[in-house]
Image (cartoon, rainbow, N blue to C red):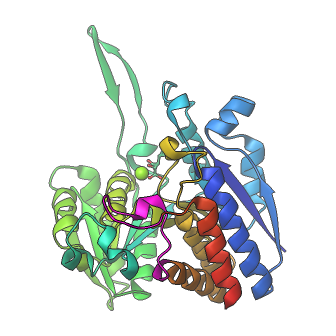
Amino acid sequence: MDRIVLLPGDGIGPEVVVEARRVLETVASAQGLDLEFAEELIGGASIDAHGSPLRDEVIDLCRESSAVLLGAVGGPKWDAMAVDVRPEKGLLGIRKALGLFANLRPAAVIPALADASTLRPEVVEGIDLLVVRELTGGIYFGEPRGRGEEGGKRRGWNTMVYDEDEVARITRVAFEQARLRRNHVTHVHKANVLDVCQLWMDVVEEVAKDYPDVTLAHQLVDSCAMLLVRDPGRFDVMVTGNLFGDILSDQAAEITGSLGMLPSASLATGGFGLYEPVHGSAPDIAGQDKANPLAAILSVAMLLETSLACPAGAAAVRGAVSHVLAAGHRTGDLVLEGEAREVIGCREMGRQVLAALEAK
Ligand code: IPM
Ligand code: MG
């Protein structure tokens, strides 16, 4: 028996997690998996109910489970709060507490959606990349950090720090992933300015020696941002630190056509993982049945593959999603302005995926 913890969170999180859960249940019974579900609060929902974005009980429950499926955290309601008690702190806290150091964010064009990108079709066509982002270190967690006053002036500071073990383990994940793909790793850095990135350079080069079958390139983060819009097809696996990965993964997501499509996995050593859509809580459309559940559903595919060792289940989910899109079903985010197309809601999109699964 495998226990899956659902953390729907805030905004559209609960809407997309419900649909993803239905998909997971359907695939599990078809594949003979024995699953049990537990549901808990995180983020703003947890602040409202318990006064804190993440409780120790929830961390313990996750530790005793096989995987976590998360919706999203945050929203305007909690925006005025200090960084240490905000909803986002719950997400950062769970990453750190569960040792989820490897964040995998694939960004690929689904052919039926190529026209939803803001980039020209011929540029978008070849996009199939994976951002491997370090998730429990770097400037997000580095000490010292804080705000204060010196000489009558307000100051704020954070520290970008990595040790060689943190760099080596994320680099290995990237090279292993590259072996499952097109055997190319791009290390993204700012070593022309930052000392910490010079350490990354050295360690990435050392690890690369164990993967002679994988090619390695180093790319400065600013020019990488530029190349991502000019020639995204050149990238296979990108490996980078927490902050650069945060920024580039949003950019990579958007150029594929819709942030609403992209799943992610945050992995610890040994197969445990937290899976979540990349899109965030989208408070502007929350509670209106307008969200796109496909990123959450595709996160279920990653969960099946990685934490439940069920590649056949993962393939079934991906097949069903492709089928539904090829049949022309679209949530609002997948439709260009001025395009004459029927738009369906979150619930209906979930139903379509279930129907496609059951038709198999
Ligand atoms: C992400 C998000 C988070 C991050 C926020 C919500 C803390 O932007 O998962 O990319 O910065 O890591
Ligand atoms: Mg982000």
Q: Nearer the viewer, residue 201 or 256?
A: 256
In this rendering, position of residue 69 left or right of residue 74: right
Give, as a single range, the part of the protein colored magenta: 325-342
Q: Nearer the viewer, residue 62 or 313?
A: 313
Residue located 40% across and 86% down the image = 181
In this rendering, position of residue 241 left or right of residue 24: left
- Of the 4 image quadrants, the one containing the N terminus is bottom right
Q: Position of residue 256 (x, y in %)?
A: 33, 69
Q: Is residue 142 visible?
A: yes
Residue located 22% across and 58% down the image = 221
Q: Nearer the viewer, residue 39 or 134?
A: 39
From this view, report whether residue 334 is shown above or below residue 121.
above
Residue located 32% across and 87% down the image = 214
Q: Is residue 270 visible?
A: no
Q: Nearer the viewer, residue 114 or 109?
A: 114
- Of the 4 image quadrants, the one containing the C terminus is bottom right
Residue 147, image quadrant: top left
Residue that sits furthest to the top in the current view: 152
Q: Position of residue 136 (x, y in %)?
A: 49, 53
Q: Position of residue 248 (x, y in %)?
A: 31, 59
Q: Is residue 261 magenta?
A: no
From this view, report whether residue 158 is shown above or below residue 359.
above
Q: Is residue 339 magenta?
A: yes
Majority secondary structure of magenta residues: loop
Q: Position of residue 143 (x, y in %)?
A: 43, 37
Total labels: the figure holds 0
Residue 159, image quadrant: top left
